Amino acid sequence: MFNNRLYIGEIVHHDQHYPGEHEGIVPRDLFDKVQAILEENCRVRGNKARARTPALLKGLIKCGCCGGAMGPTFTKKDGKTYRYYVCIHATKRGWNSCPVKSVAAGEIEGVVMAQLRALFQTQEPIAETCRVARQKEAAEIEHLKAERLGMTGEPPPRGRAAA
C-alpha cells in the first residue's frame, strides 16, 4: 500500500511510472517522505539480518554470470552442515536461469580472505585508507561548523573546547 503510486496520481506499467488520468489522494511530498523512511528501515533490517547470519560475504557477493546477488544457505546431511552461496536469480526465476547457481561458502570465503591478506600485507592500501578517512573527517568537521554557524549566527568557539 505504501509503495502504490496510484495514490499520488500515477500509474505503473512494466516498472515505468506515468502520470495517470486520475487525481492523487496523497501529496507527493508525503509519499516521498514515506519512501525515504521505508528505504532506511529496509537497510536497518538488512544490517540486523547480516549481523545474525554467520556468512562472511552476505550482502557483498554477486553472481559472476548474471550479476545478481548471492545469498547464504545451507543443507544438512548425516549431521554435517554444508554452507553455500546461491544466486538469487536462480532461486527466484528457476534453477536453469543461471549457470553458476551456487558456490561452496568455504571455498569462496577462503579465496576472498587470501586476496585480502595479500592486499593488506603492503602498506600502500592502509596508508591510502587512513588518508581518505582523515579527509572525510576534516570535511565532516567543516560541514558541522558551517551548520552550527547557520543555526546560531555565531562562529564556533576557538580551541579544543569547540570540538
Image (spheres, rainbow, N blue to C red):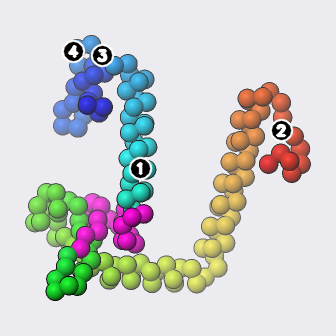
Q: Kindly state the secondary structure of the residue where label 2 is placed.
A: loop
Asked if disc 3 and disc 4 are in contact, CB closer than 8 Å, the reply is: no
Query: Disc 3 marks which amino acid?
Result: Ile
Query: Disc 2 marks which amino acid?
Result: Pro
Q: For the residue carrying disc 2, how many other residues have a C-alpha within 10 Å: few (<14), some (14-19), or many (20+)?
A: some
Q: Which residue is mark 2?
A: 156
Asked if disc 4 and disc 1 are in contact, CB closer than 8 Å, the reply is: no
Which residue: 20% across, 59% down?
89
Image quarter of the N terminus: top left
Eyeballing the image, is 56 above or below 38?
Answer: below
Q: CA distance from mark 1 to mark 3?
A: 28 Å
Find residue 133 and name its label.
Answer: none
Question: Mark 2 or mark 1, which has the lower sequence index?
Answer: 1
Q: CA distance from mark 4 to mark 2?
A: 53 Å
Asked if disc 1 and disc 3 are in contact, CB closer than 8 Å, the reply is: no
Residue 47, position in %: x, y? 42, 56
Question: Mark 4 or mark 1, which has the lower sequence index?
Answer: 4
Q: Work out whether residue 19 can be spotted.
A: no
